[in-house]
Image (cartoon, rainbow, N blue to C red):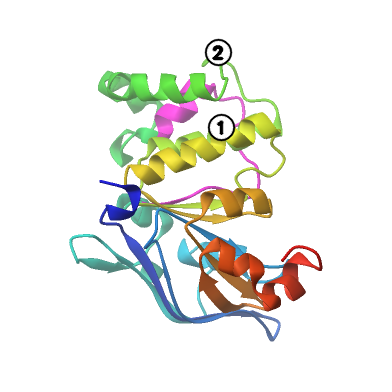
Amino acid sequence: MTPSDFPRSEIRISGAKKSYAGRMVVDVDELVLGRHPVEGLLGPNGAGKTTLMRMIMHSIPLDEGTITLHKPDRSSVVLSEMSTDEMVSHGVVKSTQVISDFEQLPILDSMLLAVASARDESPFRLWAERSVAASHADEIRHQLDYFGFRDPFAVAGSAGDKKLLDIVRCLLLKPAVLLLDEPTAGLPDDVTRKVMTAIKQIAAEGTSVVIVEHDLDVIWELCDEVTFMAEGRVLMKSDPATIRAHPAVVEKYLGAGHA
């Protein structure tokens, strides 16, 4: 079975609007995300990409419209009526654009908190529940080794390390839908390649991945389909080659010489 053959969870956005001080920043009539292994959201600054991602996770409320998760078993839930915690329980996970981490919490502890169930989220309960650590030890060790974290008891110090750990936490959850907001921004080339490989792998295992990314090489190489936004609206949705060559995309985003 190829990655494109997997039954995948889809996010369906209908009539979604968001405005600030009378300015419409997102105005999406109909958009489906997740039909392909890896999809990209592309557009100039202010296009509404990150706002739309946050609207999906309900960290920014919609002014109008609905956002629904449709699962491979044909069941569906309305994400726009849920808290972020409830969405995670349905397999919808988003990385953070703003770098953050648990201050002074060892790397291993922050990974264990990511995979703990709700009843085990208290640190005291977590350590008492040794099965949590045991059941996820191999995967945590694999991910930390892969991304070069040699000491799991250290505290993440650099912005790059915190960004990577946020990505690792998302990967450990094995989500149905993974939303990544600029996952490679600020990372060196060798680490960017590792992140791209990890994204390909989780997508090949059945996760629907949606990426907002300004590094066009990441978009062109990773994505099976790209949605191009400008001024809060979806202008087109197609394969990367078609998007890359379209005159409207060249004019509004890529500039002359990129077609």
Q: Judge from the rendering whether residue 19 lies leftward or rightward of residue 227; answer left or right.
A: right
Figure disc tally? 2
Q: Residue at x 40, y 28 (%)?
A: 112
Q: Is residue 170 left or right of residue 50?
A: left
Q: Quadrant of residue 4?
A: bottom left
The kind of secondary structure element at disc 2 is loop
| Three-letter amino acid code of the residue under disc 2 | Asp
What residue is rendered at 69% in x and 36% in y?
187
Question: Which secondary structure lies at badge 1?
Answer: helix
Q: Residue furthest bottom?
A: 22
Residue 156 higher or lower than 20, as above or below:
above
Task: Looking at the picture, tell me which residue is in the foreground, 218 or 52.
Answer: 218
On the image, numbered disc 1 is attached to which residue? 194
- The residue type indicated by label 1 comes to Lys
Please state if 254 lies on the left or on the right of 180 as rendered. Answer: right
User: Which mark is drawn over residue 56?
Assistant: none
Q: Which residues are magenta?
A: 92-114
- Name the foreground residue: 224 vs 186: 224
Say above or below: 117 vs 133: below
Which percent across, then down, holds residue 206? 32, 47
Would you call the spot at circle 1 few (<14 residues within 10 Å), some (14-19), or many (20 or more)? Answer: some
Q: Residue at x 62, y 25 (%)?
A: 156
The residue that appears at 48% across and 29% down in the rendered structure is: 110
Give residue 115's position: percent from left, percent from top. Answer: 36, 34
